[in-house]
Image: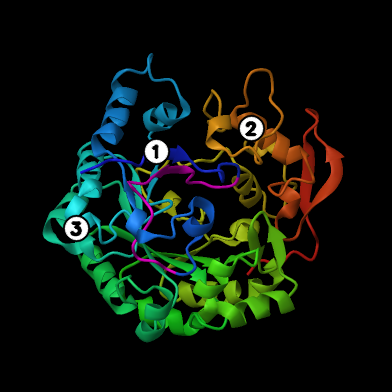
Amino acid sequence: MVFEYKNPLSITSQFSFCGMPFRLDTYSGCDFLCIYCFSHKRGGNSNYKNIKIADPDLIINKFRNSLEKPKINTGLISQYIRRRMPIHFGGMSDPFQNIEKKAQVSLKVLKFLCSINYPVVISTKSNLLINKEYLETLKSNPNLIIQYSFSILNDDLSKIIEPNSPTSTEKINSLKVLSKHNINTIIRWQPYIVGLSENPLEFVSKIKNSGTKHLIIEFLKLPADNNLAWETSLKPLNKVRDYYNKKNSIVIGRELILPPKEKVETIRILKNELKKYNITLGVGDNELQYLSDTECCCGVDKYKGFENWNKFQISYAIIKSINNQIKFSTIEKQWSPTGSIDKFLNSESRIEKNKDFNRVSDYIIDRWNNLSSDFNPSKYFEVEDSGLMDEKEFRIFEFRKSKTKP
């Protein structure tokens, strides 16, 4: 087996507003070929024949060396590992896609992570996890959560949108099996596709008995450009693009995003319906994360063993400040790694160097005070700059009086 994927462990560019920025991917590329997949846009992984495989031993050794040789392994990844920050297994590509049946790279890595009870959140659509060897491995680690991704529950329609993925019926069955074995499960309704996905009441009626206790919703992001290959693959979503354009959707980076005011009512209905079944809601859309029932939109703060999720970030400051002024001091003393974060970011995302390199804290501070930054608190729904500064010259933000919270 040839191991060509050289970047399996990384920190995502979302570290300034995400509770789970530490990612692990055993494959680059995915053979499920979901037509909306963001990894096509961000990593160019559109050809399933070009899937690259990571070396599981290199991943395992990185964990071992970080834990056993802290004086030598001082980088950000090693700091995250020693911190036991929860890792998002499948941040870019599904770790249990069809190639895993033969390669079993993810299984080898999973066995190691479970052997040290490392906190892991797996994102997948695969039914492979209910196979005996995988299931027994999952059961051995109490610090583990499985996120199953859905877009559309109608099996016929989902096969058009997610051609090589298991059907929604099969995924719900997997959730039930995992829950029966006391494995923590979460449903990720991502992407929610306006006009194609079920309405919230119908969706909840079909997943309420799956055993999951948390659901995340995140609305579809369309590619902003008119790339011909994209337009061909996204043909089933053409009406969705028309809708986005009609609603004056905004371009952020390379993505066309539905305005938050167009999402709030769906979130309100969904939240109220989930409450009937004791299921909490997380909102994955960046500008609306504070509408979540949990402090981390992924819901990991509900579970023992996941206490060290990333709290030194802007979304956490906002959700901790509902009905109050939003101050940097809310997160100032939260744990943050030292050392350079620059290499994990593309050149367009980097800020001007502070001396030799920039730390995570340099980026958070810059994005906090820079009103033109896409990550500034004022970019969150119904949040605005108050015009005031604190004693350390950090901007103070506040909720508009018309703030909407479902």
Residue 70 visible to an observer of this rendering:
yes
Q: Nearer the viewer, residue 171 or 215?
A: 171
Q: Is residue 368 left or right of residue 138?
A: right
Residue position marked by numbered label 3 in the rendering:
101
- Determine contact: label 1, label 2, CB under 8 Å: no
Any mark on residue 332, and which?
2
* Secondary structure under the numbered disc 3 in the rendered image: helix
Residue depicted at 77% across the width and 47% down the height: 397
* Secondary structure under the numbered disc 2 in the rendered image: loop
Q: CA distance from mark 1 to mark 2?
A: 26 Å
Image position of 47 with respect to 339: above or below = below
Question: Which quarter of the rendering shows the C terminus?
Answer: bottom right
- Determine contact: label 3, label 2, CB under 8 Å: no
Residue depicted at 43% across the width and 31% down the height: 77
Q: CA distance from mark 3 to mark 1?
A: 22 Å
User: Bounds of the magenta span?
Assistant: 17-34
Residue 63 in picture, x, y percent from top left? 31, 30
Q: Give the number of the mark in front: 1 or 2.
A: 1
Residue 127 in picture, x, y percent from top left? 24, 66
